[in-house]
Image: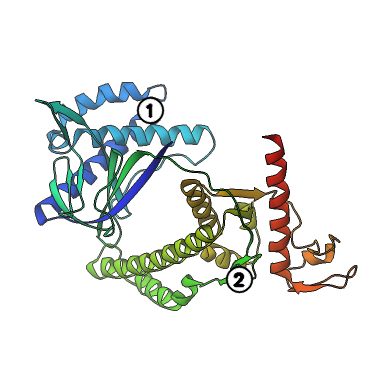
Amino acid sequence: MEIYKAYKFRLYPTDDQKVLINKTLGCKRFVYNYYLNYLKENKSRSKYDLYKDLLKLKEENEFLKEVDSSVLCSAVDDLCKAFNDYYAKKRGYPKYKNKLSKQTYKTRCIRSTYKGKEYSNIEVDLLTRNIKLPKLGKVKIRGFRTKDKIDGKILNATISRDATNKYYVSVVVVEDILIEKVTPTNIVGIDLGIKDLVITSDGIKYSNEKVLMKYEKRLKRLQRKLSRQVKGSKNYLKTKEKIARLYAKIKNYRKHYLNDIANEIVNDHDIIVTENLLVKDMFKDKRKAFNKSLSDAAVSTLRSLIEWKCKIKGKIYYKINTYYPSSQICSHCGYKNSKLKDLSIREYNCPECGSHNDRDINASLNILLEGLRLHYNLQSLV
């Protein structure tokens, strides 16, 4: 089975390499903005017309020849994709790129053979901690200390500079791996929430760390400071970088925490069942505190992580129907109590059988039972 994987490394370029990376980012931005302006006036042009025109643009602007040519082509690809998404009503109209936000460029992996030896313009050496990139040559990297090499065929690499002026490279590879399906011996139902992020049918609760709220006061103070400073001044840029570093810290903490939860759940269970929450619809709630907590919890990210890890480890993953009333049904007798729609009620007391249970654990047990039903229905069709 072929799967795509991305390996992200921290880059440590020399001063000369930083200059070339920044030039490449500027050239990509120039090409993107130039053709965005061009397509506003010439809407009927195709991607291949832009490729032909790009050759003329390079002749007119000598500085474009200093950078990797595949980066300029990928800028055209990105723009065409943005327009396709706009016409498909997936996103808004494409916007001009600016140099203050996160900057990225993508370069393709090109292979050749000479005198029986294979060569590639992108190579990763985890033993010496170096990566070879087009035009840049060898650059120091950090990451994936437990691996000796990257398996699979490298397709492309994306170099990025974030708002904190740190450099990263993400290498996309395609691997042909044999995934052995696990014979299931246990199952877990998972209720996703805000007060507790994960509640399992085993009775285990993973708390919502509320990372954003921990740093909220510091963020507000820095943002107020930024609003008083002259836009574009040195102090303005310093404060902006401090804010970016704080957001990066929040993002990394959350990413690490969610990965730990997903790994623990997937490693300990063979069948995992979750709710299929419509998170976008949940954000329509008018309560700002609820929306902030929902965003901080990153429920969709956790669900995607669990699904991906199940796929590569041969585990079974089910998402139950969005409108399945897991919180309203008694997990003991099946009685449905519509009053449980009120989120302030945290206990489930069944008027039919008299059973008493925690609201969220009761919901996770119902999710487990619905997952079992789905599993046996699918098995009967095989």
Q: Find residue 63 and report its image quarter.
A: top left
SS assignment at label 2 = loop
Amino acid type for the residue under numbered disc 1: Glu
Between the residue at mark 2 and the residue at mark 1, the CA separation in whole angstroms equals: 59 Å
Residue beneath the point at 38% across and 27% down: 41
Camera-near label (2 vs 1) is 2
Please state the total of marks drawn on the protein image: 2
Q: Do tag 2 and tag 1 residues touch (Cβ < 8 Å)?
A: no
Q: Is residue 54 above or below residue 138?
A: above
Residue 328 in view: yes
Q: Which mark is residue 204?
A: 2
Q: Which mark is residue 41?
A: 1
Amino acid type for the residue under numbered disc 2: Ile
Q: How packed is label 1: few (under 14 Cα within 10 Å), some, or many (20 or more)?
A: few
Give the quarter of the figure containing the C terminus.
top right
Q: Find residue 285 and report its image quarter.
A: bottom right
- Residue 118 in the image: state x and y as whole percent: 16, 31
- Residue 53 in the image: state x and y as whole percent: 26, 24
Residue beneath the point at 47% across and 60% down: 263
Give the side of residue 3 with respect to residue 242, left or right.
right
Front residue of this view, candidates 12 and 360: 360
